[in-house]
Amino acid sequence: MKALFVAWRSEEDTGWGPVGRLSFDGLLYTFCYLQGARTLRGFRPFPGMDDLDQVYESEQLFPLFANRLLSKARREYDDYLLWGGFDPDNPPDPIAILGVTEGIRQTDAIEVFPCPTTDGEGCYISKFFLHGIRWLGENAIECVNALTAGEDLVLVPDEDNPADLFAVGVYTSNDVKIGYVPRYFAHDMRKLMVGCGDIFHLQAERLNPKAPLQHRVLCRIQACWPDDFEPCSGDAFLPIPSNVPARCD
């Protein structure tokens, strides 16, 4: 089972939160709303998915999410797959692509992110595109352009960030801030940084110098999975339909 959380940003403030969960078992796509859809101020059900209590199923990816993937007819489609670390000759299923590209569109306030699970050895492994490069200015962009694939990066909690209490900055080994961990990973990253100690490694896995800034640096995190670690936990992540398992694994 592959699963993604669907997050929505409130138009009334800077708050955001999980509102849905998209799953794929190899044959069927399933979507259900989470408790966050009832508590996030200003949220309205997505078009064609009006009932918060219903479980939606389809053999095809729902249009809401299919429209967040670059069309295969686009000239740059192969580059788009390469930016995310995928093989154009052996493309993954759409939900895997969405899990890395985040399904971000400039016209709305929806993002998707993967439901964390352990690898075969009980470790936490995740990939994400570096966020916030543009907001940090020309110095950050120059440093990003000078990175090499496989270069080690450093995470530092951003305690003075007024927009996100859990923000985590990403720095080069010589202490230059070049971006941020995606906000939906930040809280978990702080837990892992404390709980894993030396068993925590971040690197610039892939660099895409010709890609837009939001796809310029593909990062990879490998860490331990502490016994008491429960990613994406809390009431907001619980499914509204009673017949849907609480966890996505």
Image (cartoon, rainbow, N blue to C red):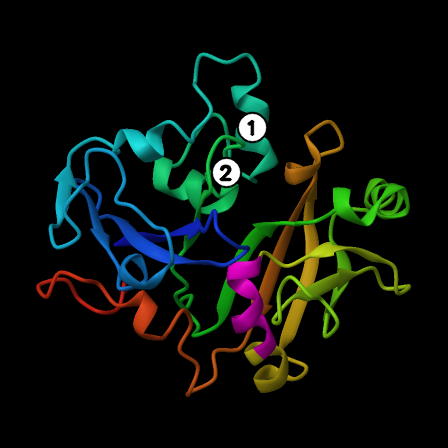
Please give the residue where the numbered disc 1 appears in the rendered image.
80
- Left or right, residue 12 beside residue 82: left
Q: Quadrant of the C terminus?
A: bottom left
Q: Residue at x 85, y 48 (%)?
A: 140
- Left or right, residue 20 beside residue 86: left
Instruction: Find residue 28 and report its horizontal and vertical position in percent.
Output: 16, 41
Q: Nearer the viewer, residue 197 or 31?
A: 31
- Which comes before the other along the chain, label 2 or label 1? 1
Please give the residue where the numbered disc 2 appears in the rendered image.
104
Q: Residue at x 8, y 63 (%)?
A: 243
Residue 202 found in image quarter = bottom right
Instruction: Find residue 131 and report its horizontal and vertical position in percent.
Output: 66, 49
Q: Quadrant of the N terminus?
A: bottom left
Q: Could you tell me if the residues under marks 2 and 1 are in contact, i.e. CB atoms within 8 Å?
A: no
Q: Amino acid at mark 2?
A: Ile
Looking at this view, name the residue that lies furthest to the front. 12
> In the structure shown, which secondary structural element does the residue marked by tag 1 occupy?
helix
Q: Amino acid at mark 1?
A: Tyr
Q: Residue at x 57, y 59 (%)?
A: 183
- Left or right, residue 121 beside residue 185: left
Vertical relation: 47 (above or below) 179: above
> In the structure shown, which secondary structural element does the residue marked by tag 2 occupy?
loop
Give the foreground label among 2 and 1.
2
Instruction: Find residue 12 and report its horizontal and vertical position in percent.
Output: 48, 51
Q: Sort mark 1 into few (<14), some (14-19) or many (20+) by Cα contacts within 10 Å.
A: many
Residue 173 found in image quarter = bottom right
Residue 85 magenta = no
The alpha-carbon separation of the residues under discs 2 and 1 comes to: 14 Å
Q: Residue at x 23, y 54 (%)?
A: 33
In the image, the segment drawn in magenta is 183-190
